Image (cartoon, rainbow, N blue to C red):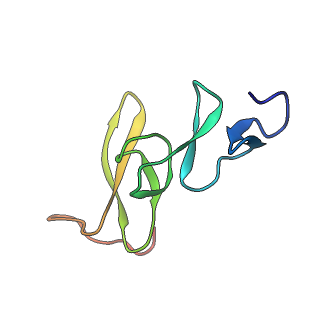
């Protein structure tokens, strides 16, 4: 468990802040938890909790549920969508 420190999240046996890419801060355990494999950065465990994507994938907004934004990483945006290179 992390003792008081300006970097309060447990990761690989040490305390860090913020959690590194590929991990997110778990509010319940004050530790860094690994993101879904599709996400470069995330705000939760599931595939649709991505904030940024790796490689040639694009972030796609899915929905907002109980104030939580759901995004997923896709290789193709699908019908009715286009790739916005500016965001």
> Is residue 85 rendered to the left or right of residue 34?
left
Looking at the image, which residue sits at the far right? 5
In the displayed structure, would residue 73 be above or below residue 12?
A: below
- Tag count: 0
Where, by quadrant of the figure, is residue 24 drawn? top right
> Is residue 62 rendered to the left or right of residue 59?
left
Q: Nearer the viewer, residue 52 or 3?
A: 3
Looking at the image, which residue sits at the far front? 13
At x 42%, y 35%, the residue is 68
Looking at the image, which residue sits at the far left? 79
At x 77%, y 30%, the residue is 2
Residue 76, horizontal then vertical, whole percent: 24, 69
At x 38%, y 74%, the residue is 56
Residue 40, horizontal then vertical, whole percent: 49, 59
> Is residue 25 rendered to the left or right of residue 14?
left
In the displayed structure, would residue 22 be above or below residue 32?
A: below
Q: Nearer the viewer, residue 3 or 52?
A: 3
Where, by quadrant of the figure, is residue 45 drawn? top left
At x 64%, y 35%, the residue is 31
Residue 78, horizontal then vertical, whole percent: 18, 65
Q: Nearer the viewer, residue 43 or 85?
A: 43
Quarter the N terminus occupies: top right
Where, by quadrant of the figure, is residue 74 drawn? bottom left
In the displayed structure, would residue 82 be above or below residue 29?
A: below
Residue 64, horizontal then vertical, whole percent: 34, 38
Quarter the C terminus occupies: bottom left
């Amino acid at each position: 468990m992390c003792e008081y420190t300006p970097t309060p999240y447990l990761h690989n046996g040490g305390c860090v802040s913020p959690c590194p890419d590929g991990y997110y801060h778990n509010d319940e355990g004050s530790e860094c938890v690994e993101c879904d494999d599709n996400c470069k950065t995330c705000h939760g465990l599931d595939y649709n909790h991505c904030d940024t994507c790796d490689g040639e994938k694009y972030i796609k907004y899915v929905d907002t549920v109980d104030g939580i934004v759901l995004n997923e990483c896709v290789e193709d945006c699908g019908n009715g969508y286009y790739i916005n290179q500016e965001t």
